[in-house]
């Protein structure tokens, strides 16, 4: 890839250098990083998380639930860093402050709640997965759920470094981001 005269935005880089045959990309340190398509289990768990969160938000309001949204995180060392969490809840106020949704641009917003499903690809490239988790937390995601389908557990992360493992019989909750939300980990894994 040729070095442009100015640093590209995430949108410019994907339009200019993206491979239309690839599934998707994230944008890290001025470079496109290909993202693999989801396996059947990964995709099913993404769908289940999105369904449960979407139903809760539809009933209670307050924001929107997205699957694989391109979020430009505005990190100090890499302001154009774009990550696409598997599922994200973004509050109405955050969406409005970012200028709303667009067909042409990624959301320049940080989700209040992000969900990552640990997959076979992540097993092969754990350092990249750990960097994605750190990026989301450093950007200000208030709650990050990492779900491990093969191990049948989840880990809840917070930006202050606090983390807690939950087994399949325990429940994830929306804390102060989505008060009243409670989802048993096994329910998400079994659908």
Image (tube, grey):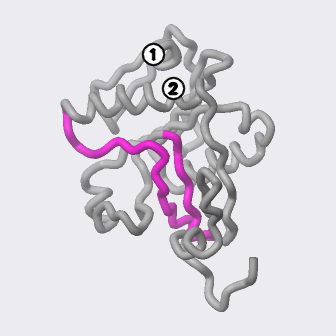
Work out whether residue 65 or residue 127 is closer to the camera in this orientation and state it.
65
Q: Residue 83 appears at what percent x and percent y?
A: 56, 55
Task: Name the residue beneath numbered marker 1.
Answer: 191
Tell how many labels.
2
SS state under label 2: helix
| Residue found at the far right of this picture | 124
Q: Residue 32 appears at what percent x and percent y?
A: 67, 64
| Residue found at the far front of this picture | 21
Task: Name the residue beneath numbered marker 2.
Answer: 44
Q: Residue at x 26, y 56 (%)?
A: 93
Q: Which residues are magenta?
A: 60-86
Q: Say which quadrant the C terminus sits in.
A: top left
Q: Main secondary structure of the magenta part?
A: loop
Q: Is residue 78 magenta?
A: yes
* Residue 25 lies in quadrant: bottom right
Q: Is residue 183 above or below residue 113?
A: above
Work out whether residue 71 or residue 158 is closer to the camera in this orientation and state it.
71
Q: Is residue 58 magenta?
A: no
Q: Residue 46 appears at what percent x and percent y?
A: 49, 32
Work out whether residue 190 or residue 185 is closer to the camera in this orientation and state it.
190
> How busy is the neighbourhood of tag 1: few (under 14 within 10 Å), some, or many (20 plus)?
few
Q: Residue at x 78, y 42 (%)?
A: 125
């Amino acid at each position: 890839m040729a070095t442009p005269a100015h640093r590209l935005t995430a949108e410019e880089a994907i339009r200019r250098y993206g491979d239309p045959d690839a599934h998707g990309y994230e944008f890290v340190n001025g470079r496109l990083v290909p993202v693999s398509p989801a396996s059947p289990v990964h995709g099913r768990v993404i769908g289940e998380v999105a369904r449960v969160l979407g139903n809760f938000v539809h009933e209670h309001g307050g924001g929107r639930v997205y699957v694989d949204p391109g979020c430009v995180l505005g990190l100090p060392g890499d302001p154009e860093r774009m990550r696409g969490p598997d599922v994200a809840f973004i509050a109405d106020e955050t969406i409005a402050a970012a200028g709303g949704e667009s067909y042409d641009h990624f959301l320049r917003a940080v989700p209040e709640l992000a969900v990552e499903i640990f997959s076979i690809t992540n097993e092969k490239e754990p350092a990249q997965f750990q960097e994605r988790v750190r990026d989301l937390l450093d950007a200000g995601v208030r709650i990050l759920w990492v779900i491990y389908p093969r191990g049948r557990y989840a880990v809840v992360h917070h930006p202050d470094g606090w983390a807690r493992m939950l087994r399949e019989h325990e429940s994830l909750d929306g804390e102060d981001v989505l008060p009243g939300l409670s989802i048993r980990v096994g329910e998400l894994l079994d659908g």
